[in-house]
Image (tube, coloured by chain):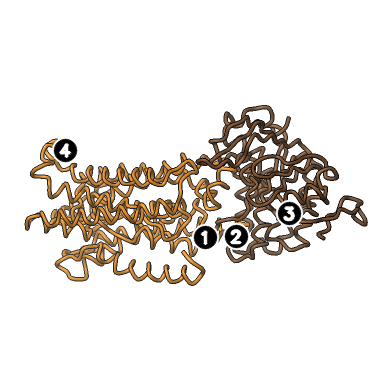
C-alpha cells in the first residue's frame, strides 16, 4: 500500500515540466520535496492531487489506478493543502473547517467534535467564530490546514491516508512553521503518509524522513536526509555554498549558508 | 459552533415564508380596481370549497384571471432570477456575477427580439409550428446556446477559467446588444412597441397558460439547484479545493450553469428583461445569513419572490391607472445598489 507514480512525464505545449519521475509516499513517512523555483515540485503535487489528467505514467493510490477511482473515495484518502486560498466569502472559521467533513457521513455530532479538535490543533480556538476573510495570511493558512486535517482525521475503510502539503509554511511565523511540521510528524505516527513541498532546507532536515530533490523536471537526488543534504548537491541545485553540521540537540544535519 | 447561523437561517426562512404569503394576498388586491383583503380571501376560500361565494362575479373574474396569474408569475420570476444569481455567484466565487453578466439574459433577449421581428418572415414556419410558445422557446434557446458558447470558450485542459468566462460574457453581451440594435432598426411601429415593452420587463402579460409553462421550467430548475448547495459551499474554497473534497467540479459547473440558463430563460421569456434581482437579493441574504448555500439559496428564492411582488405592486400604483414597466423599477433600485457594491469591493482591495 502506497501512493505512487512511476514513469511520470508531463508537458504543456513544447515545455516539459516533468520527465520520467518515479515518486512514492508510504504510509507513516514524511517525504519532503525540495528544488529551485520551476523545478516541477508543484506540478508533481498537482498530478498527485488529480489536478492534471494529461500526464503520462502510472499513478497508483493504495493499489488502485488513480484515474479509475471515484472522486469521492479519493477524498476520503487524500487531503491537499493548497499554497494559497481564494475564499473571499464571509464564512466563519468553524464553517470553513466543517467543509473538510464534506466527503464523510459521520453524523453532525461527530463532525462538530472533530472540527473543534482540529481547530485546537492549529491553535485557532480563540478565533473559531471569526470571519475568515478578516484573518491574516498566516491565520488563513492554519484554518486551511485544520480543514484538511478534519478531512483525513479518522481512519478510512479505503486504506491508508495521505496528506499533500504545498508550501505549508510559506505564510507562517517561525513558531507556527514548527507547529505545522510537528503536526505533520504527529500524523505520520498515526500511519498517514505526508508529502510536503518546502523551501527551508533546515525544516526539511529537521522533520523529513526522506528528501526528494527535483531539478528541471527530473529527480536530481533522493534518499535519507543525511545522504541528500550534501554541500556539493546543494551548490549544483541552488548555486549557493553551504556547510552541513550536526544540530546541537537533535544531531540531525543542519544547513549553514556560507 | 456554527449552529448559531443555522438557527438564524431556519428562523429567517420561516419569517420570509410568512411575509411572502401576506404580500401575496395584498398583491392580489392592488391595482386599478382595488380589492380588500377579505374580498381576495373570500374568492380563495370559496374556490377551496369551504364556503359559498359571497363576492360579485366581476371580482372573481379580476382575482382569478388577472391578479392571481400575475402574482404567481411575479413570484416565480423573482425566485428564478434570485436563485440563479446566487448560484452563479457561488460558482464564480464573485458576488458581482449575475445571469446578465455571463450573457444568459443577453442571449435570451437577442433570440426573443429576433422572434418578434422575424416572426412574419424568416421565422414564420417556426411561429406557425409553436404558436404562442415560439417567443418563450426562442428566449430559452438563446439563453441556453449563449451559455454553452461561454462555457466552451472558457474551457481548456486546465479546467474552466472564471476570468475567460466573464470576458466571454462581456463580449457576447456586446454582440447580442448590437444584434438587438439591428433588429430594432428593422422593426416596424407595432413591433417596436412590443420590443420596448418587452425590453423594460413586465408581468402584465400573465395568463394561466404561460404561468403553467414557466412554472414547470422554473420549479424543476430551482429544486435541482437547491440540491447542489453543499457542493457550491465547497466551490467557494476554489475549484481545486472542491475537487479534493470529492466534488465532481466539472459536472456541477455544467449542471448549475444549465439549470440557471433554464430558470433565467423561462423567466425572461414570460416577463422580459427584469434586471438586478439576481444581484440585489442574494447580496442582502448573504449580509444577514452568511454565504452558506443551504440557507442562501432557499432564502434568495423567497426574498426574490417577495421583492418582485413589491416591485410589481409599485409598478401598478405609481402612475395608476397606467403601468410602469417593472424592469424600470428594479433597475432604479438595483443600479445604484450595484455601483455601491463595486465601490465597496474596490475599496476592500479589488474585484
Say few, some or many: other residues with alpha carbon within 10 Å of mark 2 (under 14 / 14 to 19 / 20 or more): many
Q: In this view, does B258 lie above or below A122?
A: above
Image quadrant assignment for residue B325: bottom left
Crowd tier of the residue under label 4, counting other residues whose Cα lies within 10 Å: few below 14, some 14–19, many 20 or above: few
From mark 4 to mark 3, how far is it between C-alphas?
A: 74 Å
User: Pointer 4 indicates a residue of which chain?
Assistant: B
User: Residue A204 versus residue B188: which sits nearer the camera?
Assistant: A204
Is residue A82 shown to the viewer in this render? yes
Q: Which lettered chain is shown in brown?
A: A
Classify residue B136 as left or right of residue B91.
left
At mark 2, the secondary structure is loop
Q: Which mark is residue A239?
A: 3
Q: Is mark 1 on a helix, strand or loop?
A: loop
> Same chain for the residues at labels 4 and 3, yes or no?
no
Residue A103 appears in the figure:
no
Contact? badges 2 and 1 (CB < 8 Å): yes
Whether labels 3 and 1 belong to a single chain: the reply is: no
**B346 left or right, relative to A31:** left
Question: Badge 2 is on which residue?
Answer: A92
Q: Where is residue B139 in the image (x, y as percent from the top left)?
A: 24, 47
Mark 1 lies on residue: B290
**First along the sequence among labels 4 and 1:** 4
Q: Disc 1: which chain?
A: B
According to the colouring, which chain is orange?
Answer: B
The residue lying furthest to the left in this view is B189
State the image quarter where residue A135 is shown: bottom right
- Local packing at callout 1 (Cα closer than 10 Å; few below 14, some 14-19, many 20+) is many
- Same chain, labels 2 and 3: yes
Of badges 2 and 3, nearer the viewer stands: 3
Q: Name the residue under label 4.
A: B130
Amino acid at each position: 500500500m502506497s501512493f505512487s507514480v512511476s514513469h511520470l512525464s508531463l508537458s504543456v505545449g513544447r515545455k516539459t515540466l516533468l520527465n520520467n519521475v518515479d515518486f512514492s509516499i508510504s504510509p507513516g513517512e514524511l517525504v519532503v520535496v525540495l528544488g529551485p523555483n520551476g523545478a516541477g515540485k508543484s506540478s508533481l503535487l498537482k498530478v498527485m492531487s488529480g489536478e492534471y489528467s494529461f500526464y503520462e505514467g502510472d499513478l497508483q493510490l493504495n493499489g488502485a489506478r488513480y484515474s479509475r477511482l471515484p472522486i469521492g473515495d479519493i477524498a476520503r484518502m487524500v487531503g491537499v493543502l493548497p499554497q494559497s486560498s481564494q475564499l473571499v466569502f464571509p464564512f466563519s472559521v468553524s464553517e470553513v473547517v466543517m467543509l473538510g467533513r464534506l466527503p464523510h457521513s459521520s453524523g453532525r455530532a461527530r463532525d462538530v467534535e472533530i472540527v473543534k479538535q482540529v481547530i485546537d490543533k492549529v491553535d485557532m480556538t480563540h478565533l473559531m467564530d471569526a470571519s475568515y476573510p478578516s484573518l491574516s495570511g498566516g491565520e488563513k493558512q492554519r484554518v486551511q490546514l485544520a480543514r484538511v486535517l478534519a478531512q483525513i482525521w479518522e481512519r478510512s475503510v479505503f486504506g491508508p491516508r495521505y496528506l499533500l502539503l504545498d508550501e505549508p509554511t510559506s505564510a507562517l511565523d517561525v513558531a507556527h512553521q514548527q507547529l505545522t511540521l510537528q503536526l505533520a510528524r504527529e500524523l505520520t505516527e498515526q500511519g498517514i503518509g505526508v508529502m510536503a513541498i518546502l523551501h527551508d532546507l533546515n525544516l526539511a532536515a529537521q522533520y523529513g524522513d526522506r528528501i526528494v530533490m527535483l531539478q528541471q523536471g527530473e529527480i536530481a537526488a533522493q534518499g535519507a536526509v543525511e545522504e541528500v543534504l550534501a554541500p556539493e548537491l546543494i551548490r549544483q541545485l541552488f548555486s549557493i555554498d553551504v556547510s552541513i553540521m550536526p544540530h546541537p540537540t537533535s544531531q540531525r544535519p543542519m544547513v549553514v549558508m556560507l | 459552533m456554527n449552529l448559531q447561523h443555522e438557527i438564524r437561517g431556519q428562523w429567517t426562512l420561516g419569517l420570509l415564508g410568512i411575509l411572502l404569503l401576506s404580500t401575496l394576498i395584498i398583491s392580489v388586491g392592488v391595482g386599478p380596481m382595488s380589492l380588500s383583503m377579505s374580498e381576495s380571501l373570500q374568492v380563495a376560500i370559496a374556490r377551496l370549497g369551504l364556503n359559498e361565494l359571497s363576492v360579485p362575479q366581476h371580482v372573481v373574474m379580476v382575482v382569478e384571471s388577472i391578479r392571481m396569474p400575475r402574482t404567481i408569475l411575479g413570484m416565480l420570476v423573482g425566485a428564478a432570477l434570485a436563485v440563479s444569481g446566487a448560484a452563479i455567484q457561488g460558482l464564480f466565487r464573485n458576488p458581482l456575477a449575475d445571469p446578465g453578466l455571463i450573457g444568459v439574459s443577453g442571449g435570451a433577449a437577442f433570440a426573443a427580439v429576433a422572434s418578434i421581428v422575424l416572426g412574419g418572415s424568416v421565422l414564420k414556419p417556426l411561429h406557425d409550428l409553436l404558436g404562442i410558445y415560439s417567443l418563450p422557446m426562442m428566449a430559452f434557446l438563446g439563453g441556453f446556446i449563449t451559455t454553452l458558447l461561454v462555457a466552451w470558450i472558457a474551457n481548456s485542459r486546465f479546467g474552466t477559467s472564471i476570468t475567460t468566462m466573464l470576458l466571454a460574457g462581456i463580449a457576447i453581451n456586446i454582440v447580442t446588444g448590437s444584434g438587438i440594435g439591428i433588429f430594432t432598426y428593422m422593426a416596424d411601429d407595432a413591433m417596436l412597441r412590443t420590443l420596448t415593452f418587452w425590453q423594460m420587463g413586465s408581468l402584465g402579460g400573465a395568463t394561466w397558460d404561460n404561468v403553467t409553462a414557466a412554472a414547470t421550467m422554473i420549479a424543476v430548475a430551482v429544486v435541482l439547484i437547491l440540491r447542489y448547495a453543499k457542493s457550491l459551499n465547497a466551490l467557494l474554497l476554489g475549484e481545486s479545493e472542491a475537487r479534493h473534497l470529492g466534488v465532481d467540479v466539472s459536472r456541477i459547473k455544467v449542471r448549475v450553469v444549465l439549470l440557471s440558463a433554464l430558470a433565467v430563460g423561462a423567466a425572461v421569456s414570460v416577463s422580459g428583461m427584469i434586471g438586478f434581482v439576481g444581484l440585489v437579493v442574494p447580496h442582502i441574504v448573504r449580509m444577514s445569513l452568511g454565504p452558506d448555500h443551504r440557507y442562501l439559496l432557499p432564502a434568495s428564492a423567497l426574498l426574490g419572490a417577495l421583492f418582485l411582488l413589491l416591485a410589481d405592486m409599485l409598478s401598478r400604483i405609481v402612475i395608476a391607472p397606467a403601468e410602469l414597466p417593472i424592469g424600470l423599477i428594479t433597475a432604479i433600485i438595483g443600479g445604484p445598489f450595484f455601483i455601491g457594491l463595486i465601490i465597496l469591493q474596490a475599496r476592500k482591495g479589488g474585484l
